[in-house]
Image (spheres, grey):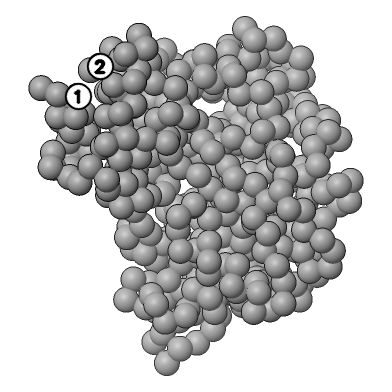
Amino acid sequence: MTINEEARSVIAEITGLPTDISGNADLYSELGVASIKAIQLLIALEERFCISVPDDQFIEATTVERLTEMIARLKQSN
Amino acid sequence: MQTLSTVASKNSDSGSGFCEAAELIATSWRENKEQALDYNAAFLQSCYEYPGVDTSLSPAIFVDSRMVAMASAFPRSVLFDRKLLRLAMLTFCTVAPEMKGKGLGLAVWRECLQRVRAAGYDGAIHYCVEGNKSNFVTVAAAETLGFEACRVFTVQQLMRFIPESTPTTKQCISDVSFRRAFATHAARLAGKEQFARTWSEREIDWECHRRYGAVCASCNGNPDDGLLTGYVIGTAADAGVRCLFFENIFWGNLDDLGRELLVTSLLSQVAGQAQIAAVPLFGYADMSVFARLGFRKTVRKTNLYLTVWNGVCPRTLSSAYMDLL
């Protein structure tokens, strides 16, 4: 599984969105993920990828593509 | 037939509380992408029991005796640049789903502004979730009346889950000494902040004791050292999920450990009743303790707007001591 696929799987698990959502769609303003779900997503991504995500970076990563880039970057710096 | 009245007019006649207004909010806000808190009838009633509320300042539009649009106004006293202002907090601007896009939101907001101005208020404050259409509607409504609604601050939020396994502790009682300490802490803050809420004794009593879901905590039972207040409310997104919403954060002379104990004490009190905790970031208190206790910054941003009839709005505030409603 690639980071992108794994991230999609976590997003689907937490939010109930399908795994094939557009990589550029905004999870919050377009797809309606509520802030409670966002916190659950943040925690789940940290656990799945064994990373620590700075809050501000997570807030900026509002799409699947940006989340994937962020995860890759954080995994690399670990 | 469309008629203009007040949010409370029908309710007070029927004695049914604020059921119709709460139902309108729930139905309308369900369409929002970013789900809100569950402003049920009991919560609304509690808001309208705030000292000094004049229900006639909260307009509602009725069609065939059914409420289709509303807005609420609640009094707040604020020290702004050392000058005491009597501001109205405008909130709960709501239009029934089938009536959206017909200008009712703009109309009811304008009406609310006009009523609070006529009632002698110095201005108004209100919040809009960033990205929501209400940001444009409310600013436009002020402009049509010749006022400027300035976006002066953006409130971010911290949030964390409260595990069911959190040990519960005894409820804090907001007794006379607690409320006296609250007044002292708040006054100290008002002396430092550019924009700070001020309180009467009755308002403090409402905030600490009488408001819907009120909770409080002090460190080792000594509120003079530091205290917290908040309230527990359901979330609209999930009927089973309740949220502890932090309101007043007064660290007093507590060190880091004392602050952690204080926050933990409040979380422990609501364990089992609330599943999540949310803290608005107004910048008036050091929030590092919350990060240490696992709170995370959320994606939600809420813009604070200030409208003053006479005088100049600040372009931005670096912090504010205010509540979020």
Residue B56 position within the rendered picture, expressed as x and y whole percent measured from the top left: 64, 73
Chain letter of mark 1 equals A
Q: Residues within 10 Å of mark 1 (few under 14, many from 20)?
A: some
Residue B295 visible: yes
Kindly identify the amino acid type of the residue bearing the numbered disc 1: Ile
Who's the residue at 13% across and 38% down the image? A19
Dot 2 or dot 1, earlier in sequence: 1
Q: Nearer the viewer, residue B129 or B38?
A: B129
- Farthest residue to the bottom: give it: B1
Which element type, helix, strand or loop, lies under badge 2?
helix
Which element type, helix, strand or loop, lies under badge 1?
helix
Residue where numbered disc 1 is placed: A3
Report the number of numbered marks: 2
Kindly identify the amino acid type of the residue bearing the numbered disc 2: Phe
**In this view, B148 is above or below B26:** below
- A11 horizontally vs A74: left or right: left
Residue B267 position within the rendered picture, expressed as x and y whole percent measured from the top left: 48, 22
Question: To which quarter of the image does residue A47 belong?
Answer: top left
- B312 horizontally vs B15: left or right: right
Q: Residues within 10 Å of mark 2 (few under 14, many from 20)?
A: some
**In this view, B320 is above or below B121:** above
Question: To which quarter of the image does residue B282 belong?
Answer: top right
Who's the residue at 53% across and 66% down the image? B136
Residue where numbered disc 2 is placed: A49
Residue B65 position within the rendered picture, expressed as x and y whole percent measured from the top left: 42, 83
Mark closer to the observer (2, 1): 1
Residue B28 position within the rendered picture, expressed as x and y whole percent measured from the top left: 36, 64
Who's the residue at 74% across and 30% down the image? B182
**In this view, B180 is above or below B51:** above
**Circles 2 and 1: CB atoms closer than 8 Å:** yes
Q: Nearer the viewer, residue B69 or A56?
A: A56
Q: Nearer the viewer, residue B12 or B315?
A: B315
